[in-house]
Image (cartoon, rainbow, N blue to C red):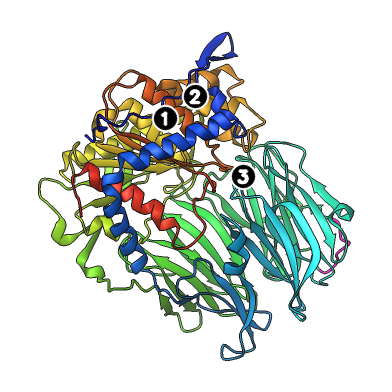
Amino acid sequence: MSIIPNQLQPPTAPVQPHPLIEFGDTRIDNYYWLNDRNNPQVIHYLQQENEYLKSALAHTESLQHSLYSEMVSRIPQQDMSVPYIRNGFYYYTRYETNKEYPIYARKIDTADAKEEILINCNINAAKHDYFSIGSIAIDSSNSIMAYSEDTLSRRIYTIRFKDLQSDLMLPDVLENTSGSMVWYNDGKAILYIVKDPNTLRSFKIFRHIIGQHQSEDTLIYEEKDDTYSVSLHKSRSGRFIYLNSSSTLTSEVLLCDADNSNAEFQVFEPRKKGHLYNVADDGQHFYIISNENAQNFKLFTTELSNTDRSHWIEKIPHRFNVLIEDIDCFKDFIVLSERIKGIVKYRIISGEQDCYLDFDEDAYMTYLVDNHQFNTRTLRYSYNSLTTPYSIYEYELDLKDNILLKESEVVGGYDKNLYQSERIEVTSRDGVKIPVSIVYKKDKKQPEGNPLLLYGYGSYGYSLDPSFSSVRLSLLDRGYVYAIAHIRGGQELGRQWYEDGKLLKKKNTFYDFIDCANYLINQKYTSPTQLYAMGGSAGGLLMGAIINMAPQLFHGVIAAVPFVDVLTTMLDESIPLTTGEFDEWGNPKIKEYYDYIKSYSPYDNVVNQSYPAMLVTTGLHDSQVQYWEPAKWVAKLRAVKKGDEALYLSTNMAVGHGGASGRFERYKEYALEYAFLLDLQGIKY
């Protein structure tokens, strides 16, 4: 274990007992006072923790510098995305040497035309510690650009407008938005979403007419149920604007005529508890993905003239071994994204043609990208795996051929043949087969086990697909094995996989991860003195739970922006995102859920036992998991745990949930995490 040097004493957070009472049960939170980011004492404590971390890991500074340098050296200094065509223009992003942020640009008609810079984010970001573009939307006449920017890292965006003909900014400014916006086809108005300033829930949709002040904007829709959030998008056909209001278990779609900026939204199918559905159109029919009597969803169609449920025609039935995740509609074909045995497959249906795209590997990540043309016979998608760098392909429907447009360069050379990926299954304690994806460098694999980093998430039905990372090479080349546990709570093996890892079955997520760790030890992939675990956000909750349950399995743990004070957060409906997640965790104001959440909530279950060495990270402006959760957790661990194994809290005082915004700056965080792992393993180079 990494032991804290005697001369370095970690900060001690003052104890200020605060009773929390529910159902006659009193919990004493000694660090509740850390919830106030405006309290100078709180800021002082976080800064003390940062200073302690820097001092305690001072001996790794050279290693951190080396790691950062090699990570950055693999990234092309000059790079450009594959251009895509939209409404007569080629759009792309590019990076310049030594610049942190992208440049968004376009060319008219051909890729050889003169470049028009839309946004140079390096200029926009110069005055901010954090800068991120949410989305860009250009009107149908190609003359006005709307874009959203976040300069605080709380995912609260300001929408601005630029006249592309004069290259001047318009006075219109829309504050406190979700960052997404949709133009009506006539270019006179735009729809956008406003967030609740306290809970950050996306709940109101306004229409903004170009030239007017935000205070004059018209409220189009308000979602008054605080367990629902709203989103907007325009169909690829350009005929409709879709408004989706959804909770974890229920959704409702409304739509309006995209040609008419005065059109009112109409409900497609009224919400019904437990009914999740999504709608798309090919300009002639609506396509509906629905879980009505179909846990893994089925596909319906109906005429544009009648959306009533009685007119839906079933096109693809429910299948127990196939999850329908999404649908994309084009003029002459549709594409279904289906998940089969944990992996996404694209099913293309065009007239009598009904086929799947073939991929060479058994485990990979893929998603459709930049398919903005409606009348086309090509489909663009990204592809990568644990050993294959991020690539862009186009599939030609008529030729039935895949064309590689670009494979991301790993500067300095990368040979995928030097690395090995595996997909194995682990039998859990209740007999369920858990997929695990593994990658390592072939010549570093040791018969008695290697240092191994096991990554997990397991919440919200999010499927953790195996993907490539040039950063990860810094571990693999030093002898580490990297593994992903596809545990329950995700949706890799269908909707039931998700259902079996939420609410009153949440502990399956933690047990699965522990069972995967034991299997990897028993099969000599690693050993308890070489096994490390990592997870972020809800994956940080996973980290907190597994070290309470089985601390002896792990030599070190990284918990990134961890959701660890589950019970207190879910009891406080004023905290961002709380009410919308009752269907995920349960509402603790119901005693059954209160008792169950309390039984696993990491903060509530810290006990006087030895814990592995830990690095905990957070951001002061985090909107997803408030900074005080990891801060309180570390403070309590310091006061309660046995032993003197390393325990570090790193708070980025300038950012939120996603970390640093620059393309190079973020690698300093990776370098710190990897130096922490390598130092525990005694690897000094």
**Of callouts 1 and 3, the N-terminal one:** 3
Distance from label 3 to label 2 (Cα)? 29 Å
Residue underneath mark 2: 597
Q: In the rendered image, which quarter contains the N terminus? A: top left
Residue underneath mark 1: 634
Judge depth for marks 3 and 2 and give the one in front: 2
Give above or below for 251 relative to 234: above
- Tell me if 359 is positioned left or right of 118 in this view: left
Identify the residue at image location x=32%, y=18%.
Answer: 608
Q: Amino acid at mark 2?
A: Ile
221 drawn magenta: no
Give above or below for 390 relative to 271: below
Q: Residue furthest left?
A: 447
Regarding residue 102, the answer to whether it shows in the image is: yes
Residue range of the region highlighted in magenta in the rendering: 259-264
The circle drawn on residue 292 is 3
Q: Quadrant of residue 222?
A: top right
Judge depth for marks 2 and 1 and give the one in front: 1
Distance from label 2 to label 1 (Cα)? 20 Å
